[in-house]
Image (spheres, helix red, strand yellow):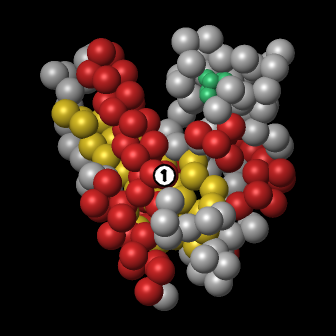
Amino acid sequence: MEIMSKIKTIAAETGFGESGYVAIENLKYYQEIRKICEENTCRNYATSWACPPAVGTIAECKARVNQYDKMLLFSQAYKMEDSFDFEGMVEGLHNFKKMVDRFQQNLGNVLSEYLLLSNEGCGRCSKCTYPDAPCRFPQFLHHSLEGYGFIVNELAKEAGIRYNNGSNTVTYFGALLFNTEKN
Ligand code: SF4
């Protein structure tokens, strides 16, 4: 279990405000979330290798997750000027994505195999290669947490961390899946 607290410490050192473990056996996958993706209000659907349909069906996502025995959910809250502060939201998301990259770097010496999921789409390249050519940076491809069919609010509750950090804030989430045995 030492590895679990080590990973949590690395998440805190990376700068994530909160993190907590979610029992793999308690994970619920919702086909309805995939329907929301398809409605494309986030404009990420079918635009990158990080989002549906490229991440596969919900069953395929579940099978990928089930290769691991631990899930650490982590989050970071960002202040906005008001609830219409779209620029602030985008800036927060960019910052969060950078933190996820840093987390991956920091995990380098501790974990060899893992699955790192991040909030929403990718956005690493100015124009994604999807669907014409493979991802340019598969080693930094972090699938969308929502794209796996999770209700993030539910995950946060399971992990014992806040989903909402109050008015005029936006909170982004990611998840790390790993095995306690193999690493
Ligand atoms: S890293 Fe680039 S090519 Fe790969 S999914 Fe992201 S935007 Fe697309």
Left or right for 122, reference 89: right
| Quadrant assignment, res 156 | bottom left
Going 72% across and 28% down the picture, which residue do you hit?
135
Q: Which residue is mark 1?
A: 104
> Is the C-beta of the residue carrying label 1 under 8 Å from the nearest atom of ligand 1?
no
How many labels were placed on the picture? 1
Residue at horizontal 81 percent and vertical 20 percent from the top: 133
User: Is 74 on the left-hand or right-hand side of 65?
Assistant: left
Identify which amino acid the numbered label 1 is placed on. Answer: Gln
Q: Residue furthest front?
A: 109
Quadrant assignment for ligand 1: top right
What crowding class fits label 1: few (fewer than 14 Cα within 10 Å), some (14-19), or many (20 or more)? many
Q: Is residue 45 left or right of residue 146?
A: right
Name the image quarter holding residue 122: top right
- Report the quarter where the C terminus lies: bottom right
The residue under the point 39% across, 79% down is 5
- Residue 18 x, y percent position in the rendering: 31, 59
User: Does residue 182 lie above or below 35 as drawn?
Assistant: below
Figure check: 21 above or below 165: below
Picture layout, residue 16 above or below residue 27: above
Front residue of this view, candidates 160 and 73: 73
Seen at 36% across and 64% down, the residue is 10
Q: Quadrant of residue 94?
A: top left
Asked which secondary structure carries label 1, the reply is helix
Question: Quick check: can you spot residue 27?
Answer: no
* Residue furthest out toward the bottom: 1
Which residue lies most toward the top here?
127
Rendered location of residue 142, percent (x, y)? 59, 41
The picture places residue 58, in percent across and down from the top left corner, at: 78, 48
- Asked if one can make out residue 131 in the rendered structure from this viewpoint, the answer is yes
**In the rendering, at what x and y percent does residue 6 appear?**
39, 76
